[in-house]
Amino acid sequence: MSVLSRRSFLRGSGVCLTLPWLEALTPGADQAPTRLIYVYAPNGIVPGGWMPGGPEPTPEGNAVALAELPTLLSPLQAHVSKLQVLSGLTQDKARANGDGGGDHARGSATFLTGVQALKTDGAVGLGISADQVAANVLGDHTRFRSIQLGTDGGQLSGQCDSGYACAYSSFISWQTATTPAGKESDPARVFDRLFRGGLTPGASAARIRAQSRRRSILDFVRQDARGLRTLLGHADMQRLDEYESGLRELERRLIDFASDREESVPDDARPDPGTRSPAERFKLLADVLVLALRTDATRVATLMVANEGSNRAYPELGSPEGHHSLSHHQGDAEKVAVIGAINRHHVQLFGHLLDGLAEAHEGDRSLLDASLVVYGSGIADGNTHSHHDLPLVLAGGGNGSLNPGRHVVWPKETPMNNLHLALLERVGVTTEQLGDSTGVLPGI
């Protein structure tokens, strides 16, 4: 029996079998595939408490080793050796550039595109996002080109920020200039889509039982096949016999593989679909995402902590006032303290995702070692709506292609899209231009 590559096994077998990465499926390969994940947090951060002490910036990226993380990043201390704090990167197209207000919409719209968002009557005009550039190539190897998740649902119609379409604030992933990639906020629904063919576990099991009882398609065409045989020569008869035998074997394997997929991800891994807090929802989405990555259901993903401009309240953190309202703190010490607590809370949620990636192993490496994970916001200071020196963290090892454990500093106004180009290179995707990029970012 010839050895199967992972792609031919998943695609060529005619079924979508969910399996973890296995050496037996990729003989001769010395590492698992590299994954690309972007996590977005809204409304920027409070000044101070994020950037570690660092060296003077250089175009090549000047770095200093990370030790004790600043207050807002301290929930990630356990992963400090797998982190890079990135300073000096800018999304210029998130600025007004003559378009007036709407920094929140532009912040999320440009985060992965680097394109000035069209501002007119709720219509959209943007550009393809970095994750979808990757998905267009890596998606050929997996059942899902990419997955897009977020604790808030996506809004496609209407205006949400100074005349900008709501879609800009709801999505960071864009398939085309006018089409955002669909986002899912229900963890149980995501699980069912990924591992149950869109059905609940019970319905999926019932479908498999029905498939096992149904008649072969050959039984319905037997009479026509007999008539056809009278017209065929010996060689064609032999080919038809081989075709029918292959079809029956394929039908049997379809049933077997569907059953395997049902059993390979147990029902107790499915999130409880009941009402949960936004923090619990995020953690469940992160857990399902880790499961999707480790089963190679996808290699590209985005996850939004909340939609940009979110005014979600966090009374458990000391204030019933909404996040967006608080971000315009005007220097009020109490509001600044609460915003800092919200920023730190969001970083803690990101830490939950990193925990899951670190605990999942493929061979002698963790899933975190095989991933490129960006966390950040398209707004730097929420009070001033600045878009330079964005708060960004790059986690993971990229299968040995990164140099983590450092704070890296570039000159201000270095395009963030240069970072996207560098990460795309590391997942095997080459593109000369993305938004306002000026070249591949060095130094990571």
Image: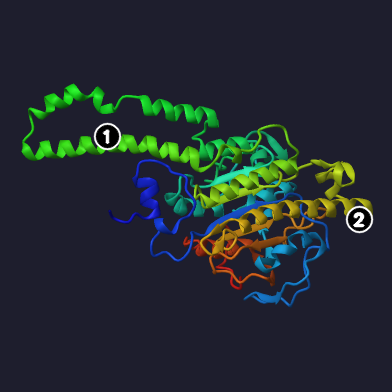
Task: Point out the residue furthest to the left here.
Answer: 233
Residue at 40% from the left image edge and 57% from the top image edge: 24
Front in this rendered view, residue 331 or 250:
250
Q: Quadrant of residue 191?
A: top right
Front in this rendered view, residue 321 or 124:
321
Front in this rendered view, residue 72 or 159:
72
Residue at 20% from the left image edge and 24% from the top image edge: 222
Is residue 118 visible to us here? no
- Please indicate whether residue 202 sits to the left or right of residue 235 in the image: right
Q: Which residue is mark 2?
A: 331
Query: Which secondary structure lies at badge 1?
Result: helix
Q: CA distance from mark 1 to mark 2?
A: 72 Å
Location of residue 233 in the rendering, given as x and y in whole percent from the top left corner: 6, 36
Q: Quadrant of the C terminus?
A: bottom right
Q: Which mark is residue 248?
A: 1
Q: Is residue 175 above or below residue 112?
A: above
